[in-house]
């Protein structure tokens, strides 16, 4: 097998070969992976190169290191599709996980009492009623999303706490017969801290993603605004890119390519 490592840099080739052992099923999810020594013997590389390739796969989330035990193949993360609105509930089920939701807060407020950009983004008059929702989304009892959301109440009157315990997409489209046009969203890397880190069961300062989006009904009528935190180690973002475009074409579209996931 060492003969396959014929191009520079060797580290990159080794990384790809080790990754392929996982993707092709030689090492299934949960199984113990090769040790540094086994990698050196199998691929004819140095201990330093083996260590670097393993560390890279750990940082990518393909493998996980368990102190005193070894390196194991991680369960694959949840997919976040950047091109379509997809329910978290459906994504979790598709990944073979059991979805659940904890409703942390639910109240009705008036737009005039929301002291930031939300009323403007939702085109809400001062007396407009908004639902304010905080939810924790879990996959196999592991919290992966901390969601804060405002919803224009007139489009879904008498929304209940029970409605919030599953997919909001299903509630909007099935219970209220709403037609969702899409959403504009922005994504940026953040450090998870304080109550959010504790709720998501990660160390203070752990990597996360903040997704800020406005969702629309047909005709461009705003329905919701959200600021949602995602565990960085639980998600993989999925997208298919088009051809190369000049920066002037891509300006303003790079961060607005996807939609949120109620």
Image: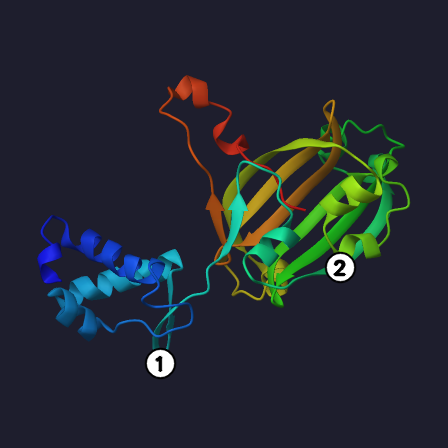
Look at 14% across and 50% down and name the residue there. 9
Question: Residue 133, position in %: x, y?
Answer: 77, 50
Rendered image quadrant of residue 243: top left
Q: Which mark is residue 22?
A: none
In the picture, measured across the screen, residue 133 lies left or right of residue 153, that is left
Say whether disc 2 or disc 1 marks the residue closer to the N-terminus: 1
In the picture, measured across the screen, residue 37 lies left or right of residue 100, that is left
In the picture, measured across the screen, residue 33 lies left or right of residue 114, that is left
Look at 40% across and 59% down and name the residue there. 61
Residue identified by numbered label 1 = 69
Q: Tag 1's secondary structure?
A: loop
Question: Residue 11, position in %: x, y?
Answer: 18, 55
Front tag of 2 and 1: 1
Question: Residue 38, position in %: x, y?
Answer: 19, 73
In the picture, measured across the screen, residue 167 lies left or right of residue 145, that is right
With respect to residue 27, does 191 lie above or below? above
Q: Which mark is residue 104?
A: 2
With respect to residue 127, does 208 lie above or below? below
* Circle 2 crowding by C-alpha within 10 Å: few under 14, some 14–19, many from 20: few
* Circle 1 crowding by C-alpha within 10 Å: few under 14, some 14–19, many from 20: few
With respect to residue 249, does 228 lie above or below? below
């Amino acid at each position: 097998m060492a003969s396959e490592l014929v191009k520079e840099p060797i580290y990159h080739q080794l990384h790809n070969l080790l990754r392929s052992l996982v993707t092709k099923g030689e090492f299934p999810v949960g199984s113990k992976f090769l040790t540094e020594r086994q990698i050196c013997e199998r691929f004819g590389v140095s201990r330093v190169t083996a260590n670097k390739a393993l560390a890279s796969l750990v940082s990518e989330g393909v493998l996980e290191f368990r102190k005193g035990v070894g390196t194991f193949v991680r369960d694959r993360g949840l997919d976040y599709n950047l091109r379509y609105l997809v329910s978290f509930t459906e994504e979790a089920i598709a990944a073979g996980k059991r979805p659940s939701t904890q409703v942390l807060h639910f109240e009705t407020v008036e737009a005039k009492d929301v002291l930031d950009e939300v009323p403007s983004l939702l085109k809400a008059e001062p007396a407009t009623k908004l639902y304010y929702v905080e939810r924790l989304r879990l996959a196999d009892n592991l919290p992966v999303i901390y969601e804060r959301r405002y919803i224009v109440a007139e489009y879904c009157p008498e929304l209940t706490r029970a409605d919030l315990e599953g997919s909001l997409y299903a509630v909007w489209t099935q219970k209220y017969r709403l037609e969702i046009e899409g959403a504009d969203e922005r994504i940026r890397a953040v450090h998870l801290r304080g109550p959010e880190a504790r709720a998501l069961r990660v160390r203070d300062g752990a990597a996360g993603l903040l997704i800020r989006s406005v969702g629309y009904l047909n005709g461009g009528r705003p329905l919701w605004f959200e600021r949602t935190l995602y565990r960085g180690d639980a998600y993989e973002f999925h997208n298919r890119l088009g051809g190369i475009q000049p920066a002037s074409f891509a300006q303003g579209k790079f961060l607005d390519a996807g939609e949120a996931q109620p």
